[in-house]
Amino acid sequence: MVKKTTLVLTIALLTFFLIVPFVSYKSLKSALKKEVFNHLITTRDLLKLQIWNYFNNRFGDIDTLSRNPVISQGFTRLSVAFNTYNFGSSQFQKIENLYQPLMEYYVSDYGYTNIFFIGRDGDVLFSVINEGFTGTNLLTGKFKQLNVAQIFKRGLEDVTFEDYTWNDKVNEYTAYFAAPVYDVDKLSGVLIIEIPFGHLDTMLTQRAGLGQTGEMYLVGEDGLMRSNSRFSVEPTILKKEVDTEATREAFDGYVGKKIIYDYRGVPVLSAYTPLNLNFINWALMVEIDEEEAFAAIKSVESRLTIIASIISVIAVGYIYLMYRKQNREDEYGIPESEEEPESS
């Protein structure tokens, strides 16, 4: 009876040592998953605010500049000189030189790529950096299909934004903000600021705390990246197409988190959100590879598997030996314990 009790207790104890680590492992995995997602969500929300502030500040810049009386006066004087003396004439350049230093200051201080004054009839009156279309007409000339021509048309009515495109002049992707300029109640033209992609790229490449595989990227409503992938040596902005469960949900207006397959076909932990800007319909993604996120868990899992295997071998061996010993005792009638006979 004692041996049977010992066997039962041994089995129970070994079972305990097998079950408890795996229960603890399950709790640890759940806690780690929650911690990783919380970090991704915090990173996502902070980056969203940073991007939101950047674009809204540029929106405010163009709105404020377009209402500046100096800018309005510049449109009037440049337009008169353009139509009277022609673009590039010495008389026109005298007027142009009055505004060049001030506009250069804005470009330098605010980090713009360029600033344009475009008359209401489409004449490009001024630009800090001369482009191929400076001095031409964006409505009738050969440049009427350019993005700057499209935003000019929309800018005649309200403050607006034009998405990033490649600019050969500065060898970088740039975007535009535009706003109408009035002389009292009369429309003078459209003021346009050009912004570089480098500002946005700097925000998206600050990957502190995201390990070796974590990345933050933007996807436009056309499904193309508005950022560069950390996994590509070539630029992916406006080239790499992304269509995942997370991007689809973000474009449907949902803010969320889940484990998905990313644009590389790799399982990742993803925290996603729409940007919620009136003039931009983009999705923001913050992700890290599942393998890296759960690397610590995988290590624990491997150790538990080894420990469980060792305990199982010991348990099976012990039970087997006890079983053989019990059978031998039953077969040969050896009692569980033999008492010494009393001396007479």
Image (cartoon, rainbow, N blue to C red):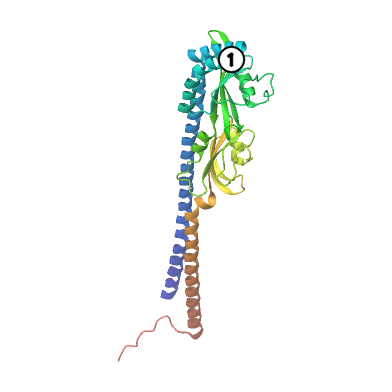
Q: In the orientation shown, which residue stands out farthest toward the front?
A: 90
Q: Position of residue 247 (x, y in %)?
A: 60, 38
Q: Is residue 55 above or below residue 313?
A: above
Where does the N terminus fall, quadrant-wise? bottom left
Q: Position of residue 299 (x, y in %)?
A: 48, 58
Q: Tell me what residue is drawn at x 46 percent, y 35 percent.
A: 46
Q: How many numbered badges does the structure rendering display?
A: 1
Q: Residues within 10 Å of mark 1 (few under 14, many from 20)?
A: many
Q: Position of residue 26 (x, y in %)?
A: 48, 54
Q: Quadrant of residue 337?
A: bottom left
Q: Nearer the viewer, residue 95 or 91?
A: 91
Q: In the orientation shown, which residue stands out farthest toward the left?
A: 344
Q: Tell me what residue is drawn at x 49 percent, y 26 percent.
A: 107
Disc 1, SS? strand
Q: Is residue 179 above or below residue 339?
A: above
The reply to whether residue 159 is in sight is no
User: Which residue is label 1 attached to?
Assistant: 189
Q: Nearer the viewer, residue 149 or 10?
A: 149
Q: Quadrant of residue 141?
A: top right
Q: Tell me what residue is drawn at x 46 percent, y 39 percent.
A: 42
Amino acid marked by disc 1: Gly
Q: In the orientation shown, which residue stands out farthest toward the top?
A: 185
Q: Position of residue 202 (x, y in %)?
A: 49, 37
The reply to whether residue 114 is in sight is yes
Where does the C terminus fall, quadrant-wise? bottom left
The answer to whether residue 293 is left or right of residue 145 is left
